[in-house]
Amino acid sequence: MGLALTGCSSSGNGSEVSPSPSVAPTAVALPGGTVGKAAAWVLEVLNADASPDAATLDRRFARTFLDQVPAAQLVPVLDQLRADREWVPVSVDVVDAGEKQAALTIVGASGQFFTMQIGVDADSRIETLFFGPGDDPHREPAASWDELGERLDAVDAQSSLLVAQVLDNGTCQAVEEAPGGSDPDEVLPLGSIFKLYVLGAVSQAVEAGTLTWDDELTVTDDVRSLPSGQLQDAPTGTAVTVREAAELMISISDNTATDLLVQAVGRDAVERAQATLGHADPSLNTPFLTTRDAFAIAWGSPSQATGWAAADTAGRRAMLDALPGGPLAVDPAGVTTPVWQDDVDWFATSSDLCAAHVWLHDRGEQDPVVREVLSANPGIEVDTTAWPYVAFKGGSAPGVLAGSWLAEDAAGDTYVVTVQLAATDPAVLANPMVLVDTAESAFALLGGAAGSK
């Protein structure tokens, strides 16, 4: 989703400044497509002797961006960053399937890391740009559980971490030494981890015979959502199978694929699936939002987030019934304000997420499609010898960053790691490396050699 540019300072943003690298940082290759070209141009600007003039900015940036961040506001931010040139891209953290959005980690001459999120529109103009505090993507995993706890405590956000072994009876037993974060096992937003419940409902429908993995679903303007994903750009009438939609939903968090699946099984089926998958309080997500619903309620014009927060279940269902069909009238560049505090998200505890992963893991033993779908993208770098099977679903939104993993080790034991972070300032969680670092450290401490990116 789009992020507007926020001002940042090399010394006054409240984040810890990393020491200057002892050796020159190694630049990584930028992503392909138009977003890679746009990122390369931004880095050229940051490493130039002067910022570009207004005419150049007008050619490079989309009008929707410049309406929100005029040149008079944009140039001073670029000047602040140029003061720490030369900037080098040291990791490519996220690239969407359509190569229209990316998240990079860059490092300046002082050794300070920043995350740079960038997106381009259909005309290859920059429509989203965000700079925020970053972390060294190559730092070693935490050497102890205490160190991991200290790293998590340093993040200015509510946090919940669960590291648990799955026992033979299917229960999740927390590893005693592992930290729990600031709010262990508290209800926190999930972002796209909610898609586990959609997959659960789909697998139930397949088992019941009301749906098959080969059934076809059709993209229409009534179900088309916003990124992440690729189906939002598919022509009307494009058909995908249920299995293809599930793979897109889990592996690249395709929002339109998700909403197609919710449409196929019904909103009520997903609401019921929450309890089946072990959610202790499904009412937190009732009525169950589609991604399109969430965009429209939170960032439509006008936003209905405060009304959603105040409404009861019946009132919320009425709000969803009143949403218009057809093309979604939400500008991705405006999706910048956290709304999870107004209940516009999906919510669960770490125990809920562990239970959901265990249920899906058991279902995967009966239906190999479920097992394969969940392991298509492990989300982090792991030693596949130590961890031969990793299921993953992550999620993010303004002010929300979360991830959940179920992994089998070489000895046949099963573990679940969940990380939930929530902040009212979206800049705090702009860099996904905090999530990657926490998860890779947890797996390393469990005994697997989780590599760092």
Image: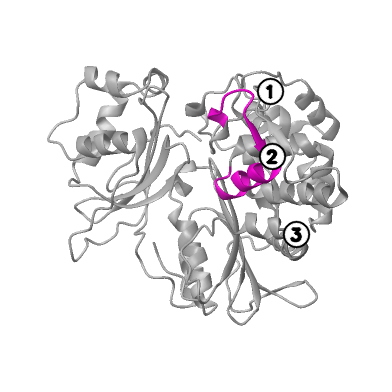
Say if mark 1 contacts mark 3, CB within 8 Å: no
Q: Nearer the viewer, mark 1 or mark 3?
A: 3
Q: Which mark is residue 222?
A: 1
Question: Which range is magenta?
Answer: 232-253
Q: Residues within 10 Å of mark 1 (few under 14, many from 20)?
A: some
Q: How is the image coloured?
A: one colour
Q: Earlier in the sequence, mark 1 or mark 3?
A: 1
Q: Which mark is residue 343?
A: 2
Whether the magenta-drawn stretch holds residue 252 is answered as yes
Q: Residue at x 22, y 58 (%)?
A: 25
The answer to whether residue 289 shows anywhere in this view is: no
Q: Amino acid at mark 1?
A: Asp
Front residue of 372 and 5: 372
Q: Which mark is residue 337?
A: none
Q: Residues within 10 Å of mark 3 (few under 14, many from 20)?
A: some
Q: Please, is residue 329 above or below residue 165 in the view?
A: above
Label 1 sits on a secondary structure element that is: loop
Q: Residue at x 71, y 36 (%)?
A: 216
Q: Residues within 10 Å of mark 2 (few under 14, many from 20)?
A: some
Label 2 sits on a secondary structure element that is: loop
Q: Amino acid at mark 2?
A: Asp
Task: Please identify the residue farthest to the front as the structure is shown.
Answer: 214
Between the C-alphas of marks 1 and 2, the distance is: 24 Å
Q: Residue at x 18, y 45 (%)?
A: 85
| Percent x, y of residue 162 | 63, 66
| Percent x, y of residue 82 | 20, 40
Say if mark 2 contacts mark 3, CB within 8 Å: no
| Percent x, y of residue 355 | 75, 62
Q: Which residue is mark 3?
A: 367
Label 3 sits on a secondary structure element that is: loop
Image quarter (top left, top right, bottom left or bottom right) of the C terminus: bottom left
Task: Please identify the residue farthest to the left as the structure is shown.
Answer: 49
